[in-house]
Amino acid sequence: MDKIRKLIDVDENALQILEKEAKKQKRSLKSLLEYTIEETARKLESPSEEYKAMMDDMLLRVQKGEVDFNPIEEIEKKYDL
């Protein structure tokens, strides 16, 4: 995937908080920001390609009879819900 360079303005207080968090995670501020932005984008993608692939696999396994389902009542009983 190609990378695109963008210039952003960040509040000074927010930047200080992010710098502290980056140090806690033993990574650079740039690395933390890139990771956070990419993770947020993945969460916003609806549905993600990974989710679609997982669901396609699950539907195929259901069609083949490889998946057992438990009634909700059984699950509630097991977990005292």
Image (spheres, rainbow, N blue to C red):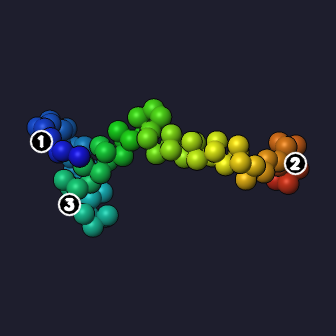
Q: Do we see residue 23 in this rendering?
A: yes
Return the x and y of residue 65 as percentages of the image width and height: 75, 49
Q: Residue 28, which numbered label? A: 3
31 is higher (above) or lower (below) than 49:
below
- In the rendered structure, which disc, 3 or 1, sits on the residue that comes first in sequence? 1
- Say which of 38 and 32 sits in front: 38
Q: Amino acid at mark 2?
A: Glu
- Say which of 72 and 33 sits in front: 72
Determine whether label 3 and label 1 are within 8 Å by CB.
no
Q: CA distance from mark 3 to mark 1?
A: 17 Å
Q: Is residue 35 left or right of residue 7?
A: right
Q: Is residue 32 left or right of residue 75?
A: left
Q: Residues within 10 Å of mark 1 (few under 14, many from 20)?
A: few
Q: CA distance from mark 1 to mark 2?
A: 53 Å
- In the rendered structure, which disc, 1 or 2, sits on the residue that comes first in sequence? 1
Residue that appears at 26% across and 54% down: 32
**Element type at marker 3?**
loop
Q: Residue 5, which numbered label? A: 1
Determine whether label 1 and label 2 are within 8 Å by CB.
no
Q: Residues within 10 Å of mark 2 (few under 14, many from 20)?
A: few
**Element type at marker 1?**
loop
